[in-house]
Amino acid sequence: MKRIEMEADLFCIHCKDEVPHKIIYINDKISHLECEVCSRVIDMSLDIQKEFYKEVYRRIASKPHRITQEYKDDLSHFLLSIPKRAITKPYRLLKDIKEIREIKKEKELQLHVYDKKEQ
């Protein structure tokens, strides 16, 4: 799951001017916008679990094509890399799960902080 944070100048309705904003994307979808001048926050309702399932489905569905292309490009490298890939796959899956948990925690924390600002 990809999490990208960037800054961009956007028009803020509250500031009534074009000012810097922090934008957080999760899998190429905007998850969070925050004005860096007035700290106004817009959280998009993004189901992290659903995004993860979509990404896993996309990766599984494209796997046969990627494997076919890989062995057509370089069969010897493909055959030599299979044992290493088989051994490291559980670790790569754990890394993905850890990333998702971190993103979910961060999203919950952002919502909690935003709720406190509202009060």
Image (spheres, grey):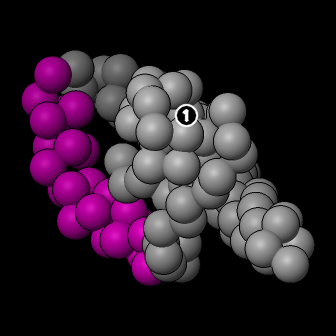
Q: Residue furthest front?
A: 16
Q: Residue 83 placed where, x, y %?
A: 55, 41
Q: Residue 82 placed where, x, y %?
A: 46, 40
Judge whether 57 appears above or below 24 on screen. Answer: below
Q: Quadrant of residue 38?
A: top right
| Neighbourhood count class around disc 1 (C-alpha, 10 Å): few under 14, some 14–19, many 20 upward | many
Q: Along the horizontal axis of the image, is 21 left or right of 108?
A: left
Count of residue discs: 1
Residue at the (48%, 67%) spot, across then down: 44
Queried whether the magenta region covers residue 65, the answer comes back as yes
Please give the range of residues in magenta. Answer: 50-73
Q: Amino acid at mark 1?
A: His
Residue at the (61%, 46%) spot, across then down: 34
Judge by depth and name the residue closer to the eye, 93 or 23.
Answer: 23
Residue at the (46%, 39%) spot, across then down: 16
Disc 1 designates what residue? 21
Queried whether the magenta region covers residue 68, the answer comes back as yes
**What is the quadrant of the C terminus in the image?**
bottom right
Judge whether 64 appears above or below 47 on screen. Answer: above
Q: Along the horizontal axis of the image, is 96 left or right of 56?
A: right
Q: Residue 32 placed where, x, y %?
A: 55, 54
The secondary structure type at the circle numbered 1 is strand
Judge by depth and name the residue closer to the eye, 20 or 103.
Answer: 20
Q: Quadrant of residue 59?
A: bottom left
Judge by depth and name the residue closer to the eye, 63 or 11.
Answer: 11
